[in-house]
Image (tube, coloured by chain):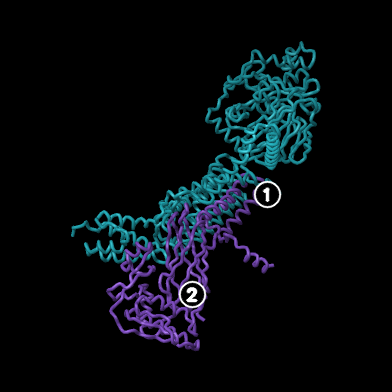
Chain colours: A purple, B cyan
Amino acid sequence: MKTARLGLRGRIRLPRRLKVTTEGKGFVLLTLGVGVAAINTGNNLLYIALSMNLSLIVLSGILSEWCIRGVSVQVIAASEAFASRESLLAVTCIASGKRFPAMSLTVVLSFGETALTARFPEIPAGGRATRVLSFIPRRRGALPRLSCVVSTRFPFALFEKSMDAPAETSILVYPEPSGAGETGESRAVNGGAAAAGRQGSAIRGVREHMPADAVRDIHWKASARMGKWMVKERESEAAPVSDFRIPASCRPDEFEPLISRACAFVLRCEKEGKPYRLWAGDRIGVDATGGGGRKRALAFLALVGSDGALPVNGRPS
Amino acid sequence: MNGGQTKAPPAGLLRWVLRAQWACGLLLLALLTDVSRPALLASAAAFAAGVFLDRAGAPREGLRRLTVPLVSLAVAASVADMLLGSQDLLFSVSVLVLGIQSIKFLLPKNSRDGWQLCAISFLEFLASAATTTEIQFAAFAFLYLGLCAGGMWALQIERREEEGEAARPVHPRFAAKILLFSAAGGFIITAILFAVTPRIGIGQILRRLGKSEGITGFSDTISLSDVTGIKTDRRVVARVEFPAPPAGASPLSLYLRGAAYSRFDGTKWKRSWGPRLRVARAGFTYMVAPFRQGIRHSTAEITMEAMDSPVLFAYGNPVMFEGSLGEIWMEEEGSFHLSHPGHSALRYRLFFINEAPGVRIAGSPREREHLELPPGWDDIRALAGRITAEGKSDSERADLALRHFRTGYRYTIADPASSIRDFLFVSKAGFCEHYATALAIVLRASGIPARVAAGYLGGEWSDVGKYLIVRQSDAHAWTEAWIDGGWVTLDATPPLGEQSPFFARTGKVGIYIDWARQRWNKYVVDYSLKMQAEGVSKGWAGLRRARAGLLRAFAPGVDFRLRAGLLAAVILPPLLLAAILRKVLRAGPRGMSPAGTGTEVARPPRPYALLLRRMAARGLRRSPGSTMEEMLLGASRRKQALAGDASRFLELYHRDRFGPLPLSPAESREAARLAGRLRRGIPRPGAT
């Protein structure tokens, strides 16, 4: 019976879910008690009290619906995510197009076994608010599918109304860097500053802004042209090209440490502004001799399999 | 809400609303119930002290040690009241609840305590609902609904704060809008639910708390000395509507009969408790006598206020009662009374016959009682003989006796006769009881069985609500005589009308207030399953009529424009209503914002906005893309002393606006304080 019910619930996805809080249970019990007393005594003023309680429950439903309806959630990476290192996610709750503010919202993001909670006490009608959450990804590759639940106890905390919010995002977790230069890089990651070759004076390109980027790195003209925030990437003086070779086929227990060392290599090169190349067997995986290869190199390392192939589904083999 | 820590109120105005809800429960108890006044006073004092201590942020953790002794004290007071005081379980429980409420008021409160106090306040609301039927309750109910909404909202915010969320105070205008919506919307929903909830009575497990005090004045005896107090009492006793008024008779001339008194000892009349008969009942219908063919039956809907007498008042010759009245007993005297000694507000429908005035349903008179005169009243027998000497029948003699009091007697309450002898032979001045008693005595002395009946005569007609307002001052006594095989009403009291010393016309406002009370009693206090059934029946009949009308309209040969108009009238209102509902329910009120803005772009919180404005005024205008950090660093370059504050402020600012969690209350206060200091310290351009 229970299995059948669960199956039915799985098939029918209700637009809203309702959970009775502890206070709500007390309120419902009190209402039932008033109902019994009213029916027993026939006292119409007790019927008024009963109707008042029921009307508060109805009002709670209306106001919470106004509060939660039209809320959307955007999730983006607030920093580069490295396996086994603290990373940041920016959760933006948007109440645009609403006429009623979003109050007392809780957004729960779940992926794999990780659940992150962000609270939004109030978002004015038409406004938005962002919270940055930290998490530690377990392994490299694309993050599992993200499920996002928005809930509120507004206005009376009798019920918790929740809904699923679509939060499409593709976040790539880079390998855990290890080996030489690793300590410096990890500090940079934790500190949230993008290590994009700031030592150089010449600007070699622009990329999209991430929440952890400093305001001073914003390229205003490019931002105005593109209609979104863009930050500068600088290059330093010319230097000899460094190569890192990943064997075409490798045992899995040896492969992951190798990928970690490759990651540390890429970060070190990027920090020092040196040109580099990544080889997978006898072919070049990433050529960053012209600069601007950080993202490509890290993405390659996040997705590459032990046979040197890049899987279609975004997961390393 | 730690008792030892001062902090900003989480919900601002809402927190006051929460306190008002607690206070409203106490106020309801004080105004509408009879619970212990000392316990109420103690609770009110604890409430005031609690508010003061909450505001002062006084450390009160030490008070928690007193919880057990204080609770023990409340229990002891309750037990003492049960054993030695009121000896009423509910009264003693109310003392205990008020004691616990007082302790809760004094101690520091978290959201859980807040919920408990809300629950106690709601119990107080229920106690007053179970006790009263006054219309004041309606105003309190509406107020309480809004306060409940605000209070629960405040507790919800407080709970979130306890869980680590730092909410900014809700803007009062926004809170007021939501509370107003909650109160108005809640009122409408309450009214609808109240109307449609079926009224099913399943028993009397719980005792109904009825106020013992009600209208008094109908005891088992009446004398010549206790009338003045009743006649000056302007309280409303009953409100009577006449769905089928008696033909040719004004409601102001109808006698609302209560009890009859047969035994007279020379100074006072007493009721004689003879055999009584239970009126046959089917559901809420009580059949007193069979409906007679060819006779017009009148109908009156009587709403009686609470009374300490079991008497059931009736007009003319009652045929049938309808209402939730329990058992009705009919006495040999033709009076009706209920099973219980008193009643709270009561509503019933009476079917009666008024065409044959005065003919009562009781059987033959009891000779011994109805002809009895006090011993030694030969002078009165002689007077009666003189008065009725020319009468050949009982009817003529009664008419002669009645005419005797039309001349030479005067109505007064200032200097009434002290006895019946005084009234008949000396002063000839008195009020209705003098007239009624004197006529009854004269009739008895003439050999006609007679008794005195008491009730109400007429009243004040309300043109607003089309009903009769019967007041205690309309109390009246008259005579009933057994003539030609039936009891006939004879009233010797001269009709005074507006000349009566007790006549007072109610003002326009008073009439409207009374109309509101009448509606409250009719549609709320006495709302019943029968009214619901009648409502459904009328609705169904209306639908059938509408359907028949539509069918007629669409029959062949009817004008096209009429058809189109009817179609539009049928289709458009529901569509319009649906569109309005959709708009209201889906979108919510326009421009509502907790911060009171409602603009498309979220403004920075107030302290930061003020700082930005001040910097702009000092020449540090904010260009597109420039940040608070850049502006502040620019300002601190002008004045190095600001660098420390600016650095700490920026840290808090960035965490507040872009961090994963809001600032704690202490950090919020620090940020606001630093913003204020920076605002004051930023120099003008060129200044050093």
The quarter of the displayed image where residue A276 is located: bottom left
Chain letter of disc 2 in the image? A
Residue B470 or B371: which is nearer the viewer?
A: B470
B390 relative position to A229: left or right:
right
Most extreme residue toward the front is A283
Evaluate whether label 2 is on the same chain as label 1: yes
- Labels 2 and 1: the sequence-earlier one: 1
Marks 2/1 in contact by CB < 8 Å: the verdict is no
Residue B427 or B175: which is nearer the viewer?
A: B175
| Total marks placed | 2
Q: Which residue was labeled with disc 2?
A: A142
Q: Which residue was labeled with disc 1?
A: A40
Name the image quarter holding the C terminus of chain B: bottom left
Residue at position x 52%, y 56% in the image: A69
Q: Where is residue A107 shown, x and y percent of the image?
A: 49, 64
Q: At label 1, which amino acid type do we have?
A: Asn
Q: Secondary structure at mark 1?
A: helix
**Residue B87, relative to residue B511: is it above or below?**
below
Q: At label 2, which amino acid type do we have?
A: Ala
A187 relative position to B520: left or right:
left
- Badge number at residue A212: none
Residue at position x 59%, y 40% in the image: B573
Chain letter of disc 1 in the image? A
The quarter of the displayed image where residue B524 is located: top right
Residue A132 or B51: which is nearer the viewer?
A: A132
Q: Where is residue A103 shown, x and y percent of the image?
A: 47, 57
Q: Secondary structure at mark 2?
A: strand
Alpha-carbon distance for marks 2 and 1?
63 Å
Q: Where is residue B299 shown, x and y percent of the image?
A: 71, 30
Q: Is residue A39 in view from this perspective?
A: yes
B399 relative position to A207: left or right:
right
Most extreme residue toward the top is B390
